[in-house]
Amino acid sequence: MKNHKRKHSHRFKIIDYNLKEVDERCSCGDNRTRPTTTKEKKKFKKEHTQMLKSIGEMHKLHHDFDKVFKKSVRYPLKKKLWHKNAKGKLIKNHIIREWRWTGYAMMKRVRSWVNQNPTAQISSCDDDVYAGSMLVLIPHHNKASWHGITVIYIPQCTGEKPTRFFLYPHHQFQLMDKMNHFDNVLRQFKDGRSELRLYRRSKHKAKDLLRRNALK
Ligand SMILES: [Zn+2]
């Protein structure tokens, strides 16, 4: 290994960087830290701005949704729960983002929001007291890349707050696999098959209606 090290001139590649220093490593394992050049500083700054912009685009719809449906609420914390911020100051209050509405009041507002933002989707379900409820699906992506889907479950009549969870692609595929599994199970039942036929017919009808309205 020592000989190998002597024979070659290092070819360093950047492994970490900031605006002050660049850490580099050669394939032989040797590291070095050097100051960032002016040219690199410009490049890093540009890359960082672009990264922030593309992250902003990726989560824009999700943030738009939150702007409408969440509000900031300040909760006084018990003394033992106080924590210091970066400047060492004790934080007296804790800000929590809360849903503005629940149940049907939220559902009807979400429906009209989705009409304005058709990249989001709504799917139906029942809540814990068998009342028709809602799943809102909000995609996170920009022009170049896909991140995942936020799902918000809004129960209509349980009095519970909406619940949010996030599906990375592998979660999405797993859920789809499980649903496909139950789709196959459902087909083994007569009433399951007729439900499927009814659903497909109503989907066709909805498409027809859209087509006819578009022609008008
Ligand atoms: Zn080397």
Image (cartoon, helix red, strand yellow):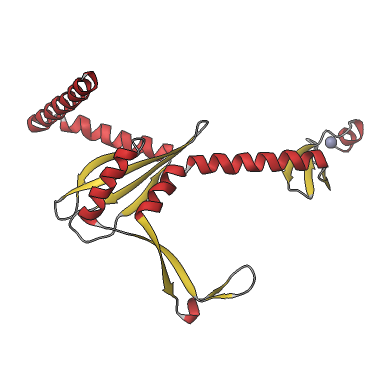
In the image, what residue occupies the spot 42% across and 37% down?
Answer: 170
In the image, what residue occupies the spot 21% across and 32% down?
Answer: 183
x and y percentages locating residue 117 in the rendered image: 35, 39
| Residue 16 visible in image | yes
Q: Nearer the viewer, residue 76 or 189?
A: 76
x and y percentages locating residue 179 in the rendered image: 26, 35
| Residue 121 visible in image | no
Image quarter for residue 200? top left
160 left or right, relative to 169? left
201 left or right, relative to 108? left
Quadrant in the picture for the C terminus:
top left
> What is the residue that sits farthest to the right in this orientation?
6
In the image, what residue occupies the spot 48% across and 73% down?
Answer: 93
> What is the residue that sits farthest to the bottom in this orientation?
79
x and y percentages locating residue 112 in the rendered image: 27, 43
x and y percentages locating residue 85 in the rendered image: 59, 69
Image position of 95 with respect to 36: above or below: below
Image quarter for residue 83? bottom right
